[in-house]
Image (tube, rainbow, N blue to C red):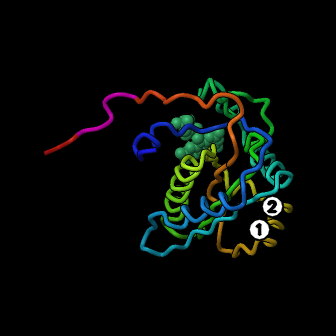
Amino acid sequence: MELLNLIKKRRSIREYQDRQISKNDLAMILEAGLYAPNAGGRQQSMIVGVHNRTLVNEIGRLNLTKFDRSKLAGFFVSKEQPSVIDDQAIQNGFYGAPAVCVIFSEKDFLYGLADAFCCAENMVLMAMTLGISSCIVARGEETFANNYGMKLLGDWGIPKNYIARCFVTLGYVAGTYPGEKKRNAGRIRIVE
Ligand SMILES: Cc1cc2nc3c(=O)[nH]c(=O)nc-3n(C[C@H](O)[C@H](O)[C@H](O)COP(=O)(O)O)c2cc1C
């Protein structure tokens, strides 16, 4: 798929089939993340690909435990693929995706957050080329701010000065892939 077309067609997917993605595809998506632009050329972000459905669901539930959705009631994200804000009954911040990538960066690095989301964008586009659906999910730090979360970070060898910034869920869309989303007008200028 030609790049601009692929960018226009990508949507955040929040309903997944049970089918797991292959480890080979996961490896390519992680590699795409590594090649993202990065502040100062420091390449400090780290990415963990979780390819275990049970663990993904556990972390997905932790992703919502500290999220006060009542404060966002009234916001609207998506009719076709309701988010945790649209449907307060959703208990899993990863929407039942079979795999998730966790993107970490140094806690005190000024551009840590920006670096992480650059990785995430590379990864969702790479996933799209492989026919894999995805959704960028926030609340990284809060998700691991509990005993179980801290144990996972230790098991994964994440240095103490790193924090989770965001996630990229991965899987195959259940049902129909939503269509291109209309853009708000008047948001670009070309100045000569
Ligand atoms: C910084 C950032 C944080 C996001 N966090 C979440 C999230 O926590 N949960 C979620 O379902 N979607 C999340 N999204 C996805 C957006 O809701 C989605 O990109 C937006 O509604 C536009 O829809 P589209 O991606 O289908 O074009 C996030 C996207 C970005 C860029």
Q: Nearer the viewer, residue 38 or 149?
A: 38
Task: Measure how far apart labels 1 and 2 are at the Cα level.
Answer: 6 Å
Name the residue tied to disc 1. 153
| Quadrant assignment for ligand 1 | top right
Q: Is mark 1 within 8 Å of ligand 1?
A: no
Direction left: furthest residue: 192
Residue 12 figure quarter: top right
Secondary structure beneath label 2: helix
Name the residue rendered at 74%, 40% in the picture.
95
Q: How many marks?
A: 2
Name the residue tied to disc 2. 149
- Give the side of residue 63 with respect to residue 179, left or right: right
Q: Is mark 2 within 8 Å of ligand 1?
A: no
Is 6 colored magenta in this rendering?
A: no
Which is the main secondary structure of the residues drawn in magenta?
A: loop
Name the residue rendered at 59%, 70% in the picture.
106
Q: Which mark, residue 69? A: none
